[in-house]
Image: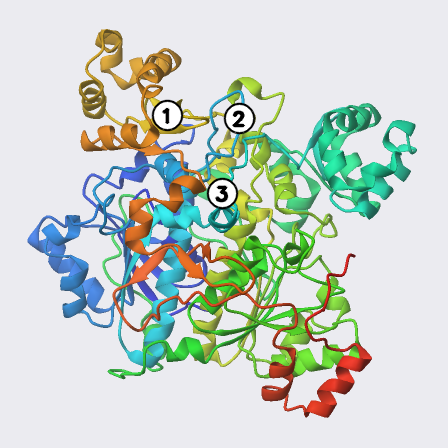
Amino acid sequence: MKPLVGMRVVDLADEKGELCGRLLADLGAEVIRVEPPEGALSRSFGPFAADGETSLYFAHRNAGKRGLTLDLTSEDGQRELKRLLANADALIESTRPGTLGELGLGASTLRVEFPHLVITSISDFGQDGPYADYQGTNMVGVAMGGMLHRAGIPTKPPVMIPGHLAYDVAGIAGAQATLLAFWQRFDTGRGQHLDVSTMDATAALSDWSLSNYSLNPQLGKRDGPGIYPLYRCADGFMRMIVLVPKHWRALLDWIGRPEKLCDPKYEQFINRLIDRDMIKSELEGFFADKKKVEVALEAQRRGITSTPLLRAGEVLENEHTVGRGTFHDLEVAPGVEARFPSGFFTLNNERTGPTRSAPTRQERHDAFENGDDHEALLALIVQGASGAPGTRLSRLRVIDCGIGAVGVEAGRFFSDFGADVIKIESSDAPDFIRVIMSSYMNPSFISSNHGKRSFGVDLSNEKGRALVERLLEDADLFIENNSAGTMDKLGLGAADLARINPRLVSLSSQSLGSYGPWHHFSGYGPNTHAVSGLQYLWNYPEDEAQPAGSTAVHPDHIVGRIGVVGLLAGLIGRERSGKGSHFDAAQFEVPIGLMGDLFAKESLEPGSVRPVGNASHRGAPWSCLPCAGEDEWCVINVRSDAEWEALRTAIGTPEWSNDPAYSTAEGRIAARETIDEALAVWTREREPREVMETLQAAGVPAGIVAHPGHHMGDPQLAHRGYAKLVAQPDFEAILVEGQAFISDSDDLPEIVGEPAPLLGEHTREVASTLLGLSEAEIDALIEEGAIEDPPKEFKLL
């Protein structure tokens, strides 16, 4: 049984955040998608099926939901909505702030009438603050959130990530918030109002940029693939990432140790980076007669992280996605099936993706159907209780074996809200982000690990491993994202965890998953760009033969956040079943899942899905344009003729804008490049904030292409208290990224910026208080190397 069976959700989200309800439905909740009489706005979004009308955007983000049409401006529609809410557990909505309030359906009103209800409001910038009334789009969200500035090549404008990242990550944050509040309701009997900001949700993906900038205010340059190079092969490209000396030596052995590359200085990554053009030329000469998949397979056999760069059609058909069942068929129109991703997780070895198509306009599910299951769930909720705020979270214990960004971000979510998160690590097997700067502490590590405790333990040591098993016996959650098979070899695989603690909820995440023909592939976040189709599509349309992409480690941060959704669902399911569960999120399948509508389109029209750069079918201009200042940019989107007229007026109605062809969307799209060139004359004379404020005052979606320098002083982020100050010993005060949502209730404790732990800082404390060991026993285990105190000096591995 899926963990959210019995949960009831009313879903009003349209365009932004629709993935929230989809994720809840995937995990077993009954979700009723309410549309207005004219139909959801997102039904008008491409890509479309062959009929030109069936929206694959809508189909992908609403699969698994039931449908209902209500006119919320009418008394009958409002009455019917309230009848649903009286029997629902959660309401999701994404209207402009204040819209539902004007109808008498605002959160403050509904919370009084339905105190049990969890209300999740997803907006572009939050329910209040300086930007609350700003117009938003997905592109504005990506730009303002900081995920656009580093994407692309330095000689061109920043280039948009394919899909709808900002609005989808807002949906993921919405699912986190909804499930966290619902889980707390088991103690309190009360609902909450959660205020989710798309800008905040996106900013949290930007590779710890705020933390690093707060200590060292320098900006990274846009550099295409950057330190994660792509190498041309006989039939395309493959990505190979060589960061450590042993991988460099393995590469030299493979290619015959050419004299040019055998200089000892190339043992150091920085020297390879300096001479990367020469090295790339040498390697591409070797790969020129070899196919990309064959090269990647051989590299992986030699222990070198490598993945082939796949086009959309190749992602659908390659042996690994076929072997894993990454895609399945869903009907999108009568008699028409498309290939959609099979879900973001496997749960106890079963796919969690939708088995039912998105609702049609004709559906009328005006009542929930999961009566017995809902009653069973309600019976577990303490009605009218008045538990102390945050007590349920403070009782939670998490064992965190995460490394890099994936697992540690999941663990950080729970530590932010007061859970006891114990990081498992040792100086012989440290989290690589901890040691990436040749020390045991840095801003990236602080951001993802502040507030945790560190237990220094050698998992390869039998006694050390036994201690971790004892910790697991009383734990609630377990998180890991090590290489495939690592935890099984240590006796801590999914089956072992269920034996040690049948109530344990666990999350595993590997680069290419834990099963399938390529499951043994090792890799970093950018390796998934290539194999998921993301790298191919993250490009300028005119440069299709030379991929651009980004230096971001995406999707690592978002995989961690998806993992939190699974873990929270598992905790809710455990309330009813008394049993734990195991979630597995393959990292490369997360960007595939976010681009599911594009893959559906490719399955219907092979070869149709290609890079589009910053363009959109929704209108023009839809642009990233230069501003005054070094590498400063803004985005401007026009969705309608009215917004076009508002834009013309705001910039002084220049002569070029009077062309009659520009009065229609079709005419503007046809003249997209000409309009961009003319509009850039105006933007170049202004700083990005002036552009944004001028156009937003006129009602035109516009935003700063933000970097951390902007985020440091951003008034909306400051208003929401997004950045959290951490007083890290031996460092100046560091700002770390906050969460994407705010609650109106004290039931959700305030995030406190506790320091990140030294390696092994809490070994003695954990061994004594949780494991009951005496000081003599602890000393003996340290002497044997099973556990360790903080190292006195850095160990170079």
Up-down relation of residue 225 to residue 648 (above or below): below
Tag 2: amino acid: Arg
Q: Residue 205, image x and y in percent? A: 48, 48
Image quarter of residue 750: bottom left
Q: Judge the density around disc 1: few (<14), some (14-19), many (≥20) Cα neighbours within 10 Å.
A: some
Q: Residue 387, image x and y in percent? A: 31, 83
Tag 1: amino acid: His
Q: Give the residue displayed 56% in from the left and 27% down from the top.
A: 606
Q: Give the residue displayed 59% in from the left and 86% down from the top.
A: 770
Among the two numbered marks 2 and 3 on one chain, the one whose residue lies closer to the N terminus: 3
Mark 2, residue position:
610
* Residue 62 in view of the camera: no
Q: Give the residue displayed 50% in from the left and 21% down from the top.
A: 156
Among the two numbered marks 3 and 1 on one chain, the one whose residue lies closer to the N terminus: 3
Labelled disc at residue 617 = 1
CA distance for labels 1 and 2? 14 Å
Labelled disc at residue 217 = 3
Please name whichever residue, 660 or 339, is drawn nearer the observer in this view of the structure: 660
Tag 3: amino acid: Pro
Image quarter of residue 360: top left
Q: Is residue 409 left or right of residue 753?
A: right
Q: Secondary structure at mark 3?
A: loop
